Amino acid sequence: MQIRKLLLAGLLGISLLGRAQGPTVTSWVINTTGLTGYNCSGCSTPHYGTIPANIQSVYYTSTDAYIKGASIPSYNIGPWVGNPNIPSDQNATFKITLNPTPNTGTLTAVPMGKAGVWSNGVTIYNPRDGFYWDTTTHAFGNSMGVTAAWNRNAYVYEAVSFDACLGHPDQGGSYHNHVNPKCLYDATATTVHSPIIGYAFDGYPVYGAYGYTNADGTGGIKRMTSSYVLTTATTRAGGPTMSAYAAGSFCEDFVYTSGAGDLDVHNGRTCKTPEYPGGTYAYFVTIDASGVPQYPFVLGPTYYGTVQAGNTGPTGGHNIVPTGATQYIPPTTGLTELNSGIDNISLYPNPVSNNNIQFHTADNTSDLNVSIVDFQGRVLINHHYASGTYGADISLSAPYLITGIYLINFESNGRKLVKRIELTEE
């Protein structure tokens, strides 16, 4: 966690301020500059940002947070091969409890459609694609509202229509991800704990792919692995044949096997995280070593916690913010420049609107570590330059780096320099 130690003075103040309200209130990508989204230059009819992007507002009471968004990210989305649907402003307000509780009774099935919300307001969808095998007619049927034994795997049947960010719109215009939202955060940052990238509708956080090796926060960082194992069965009881539909085509082809991975039947675990040092239940997105999504992708077939009414179903996600709720305003002014011994580093252009920002220093006799951090303290980009080789471009082309204010940290031989940069639209 060496990089996080660079967040001195001003950034530490932000962390302490956010802690007062709690991660359920502070972990959202809030649009404070009027950004618009749904940019798709490769679509059959090109479209350029007209819908409000990311989270529009966050309100909270003593019991709940209210998250308003359009389900449109600020990064580019589309095109969607073979998918005729068009993203639209969902004007959603999701209600997330501040006090999640385990469900000790009958577990709640993760529903078709909306199952949670990513930190940028885009909706989290379940692992199914909306069709099931009807054991009576021996054909596929639409599974909305149907409890079925064999449900099609969305990644198998719909991945062809996913864009580069692994999302697509549904018939109602809701842009969503069934699997790891690869443009929302850096899933290649394998040496730091992944950030909170959303919340499930039972109120528990959803993290990226990497967490502490041990649930008590020790043992370094590792990729969290699913405990669902692909079946070795040669038949499906009442279902389609294996010869016609290979193993993995249906969600039920994956069998929960306790201890096979890091995560439980819900695709989460009780553990310590940077935002919850005292421990919490948390879901993790699951991918393999190459970044390929692994079932159940985000949430398991059932939720771990008690699910509140108002978020799921065809009319879900249109909660009313109660009178007297407090609006959360992200403290961007705390991003201050600091210097503890590194001199003569110039940084340009700033603001920057393209994919690279240049830096130069007269002293390159020691190794230099350069990281870019957002106002929540998340390390988004990390570069290491060997002595004698730096004084060049820093790539800002990672898709998870959206327009806004960031800190860029330079560390060399025990000395630190922190500068503030602004990334703008081209």
Image (cartoon, helix red, strand yellow):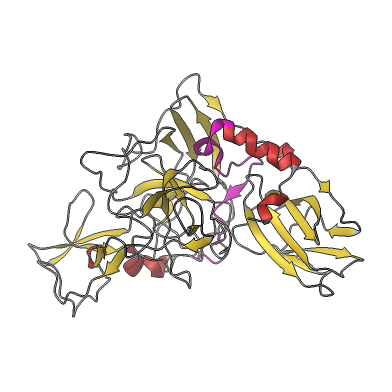
Residue positioned 31% across, 38% down in the render: 306
Nearer to me, 287 or 53: 287
> Residue lying furthest top in this view?
324
Q: Residue 127, image x and y in percent? A: 32, 58
> Residue lying furthest bottom in this view?
243
Which stretch appears magenta?
20-44
Tell me the quarter of the picture where residue 250 sits: bottom left
Residue 426 in view, yes or no: no
Q: Residue 49, image x and y in percent? A: 59, 52
**Vertical order, 334 against 50 (above or below):** above
Nearer to me, 137 or 166: 166
Q: Residue 54, image x and y in percent? A: 55, 46
Does residue 389 appear to the left or right of 251 in the view shown? right
Does residue 214 appear to the left or right of 350 in the view shown? left
Residue positioned 71% across, 42% down in the render: 11
Residue positioned 35% across, 53% down in the render: 299
Does residue 79 appear to the left or right of 16 in the view shown? left
Quarter of the image where the C terminus is located: bottom right
**Vertical order, 351 against 327 (above or below):** below
Nearer to me, 110 or 315: 110
Residue 98 in view, yes or no: yes
* Count of marks overlaid on the render: 0
Quarter of the image where the N terminus is located: bottom right
Nearer to me, 287 or 413: 413
Magenta-colored segment: predominant secondary structure: loop
Residue positioned 19% across, 78% down in the render: 244
**Vertical order, 65 against 111 (above or below):** above
**Vertical order, 342 against 260 (above or below):** above
